[in-house]
Image (tube, grey):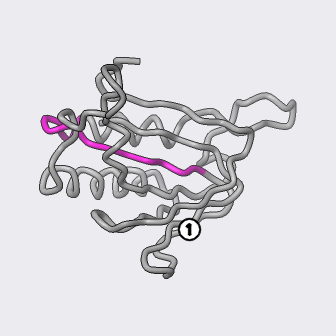
Amino acid sequence: MRAVVQRVCRATVKVHRHTVGQVKHGLLVMAAAAPDDTAEDVRYIAEKVAHLRVFRDPADKMNLNVIQVGGGVLVVSAFTVHADARRGRRPSFDTCAAGEIAEPLVEQLAEAIRAYSLHVETGRFGAHMRVASVNDGPICILLDSRRLF
């Protein structure tokens, strides 16, 4: 499983002009599953998201996590996070899980993050979504449960 995690002032996801998920101060997580991902991959990403120290402490150091600052998390399924663009100009999606595999894994990710007593909202799997965010920093972190980067 892979995720792009952004520290945000606010983030919103809309489907057909209707807001389906939003957070104020917190994290936007764009997540994608691989065909052979397991519950262990989900747990790894959820633990990282909950405990990433990307928020400033009183000494102006990035030492606090989203739990400590009382932030929220918006999880949006984005299969393109798993795309491979190393060759040519058109990304390959061969490493992306099919919907019937990816959907339950992304739902499990949202639930696993909620288990840390965090407020979590989500997009709508498979829908054409409009995601708007105000990145705070900007802070963008790449996560990979296989630890490839």
Judging by the rendered image, the residue that carries numbered circle 1 is: 22
In which quadrant of the rendered view does residue 128 lie?
A: bottom left
Is residue 60 found left or right of 65 in the rendered image? right
Nearer the observer, 62 or 102? 102
Q: Where residue 148 sits in the image (x, y, percent)? A: 34, 18
Give the magenta range.
27-40
In which quadrant of the rendered view does residue 133 lie?
A: bottom right
Question: Which residue shows up at 32% across the image and 34% down it?
Answer: 90
Question: Which residue shows up at 50% across the image and 58% down it?
Answer: 74
Mark 1 neighbour density, 10 Å: few (under 14) some (14–19) many (20 or more): many
Q: Where residue 124 sits in the image (x, y, percent)? A: 35, 68
Is residue 31 found left or right of 22 in the rendered image? left
Q: Is residue 86 positioned above or below 104 on the image?
A: above
Nearer the observer, 47 or 21? 21
Q: Where residue 22 sits in the image (x, y, percent)? A: 56, 68
Question: Which residue shows up at 42% across the image and 56% down it?
Answer: 76
Total labels: the figure holds 1
**Magenta stretch encompasses residue 58:** no
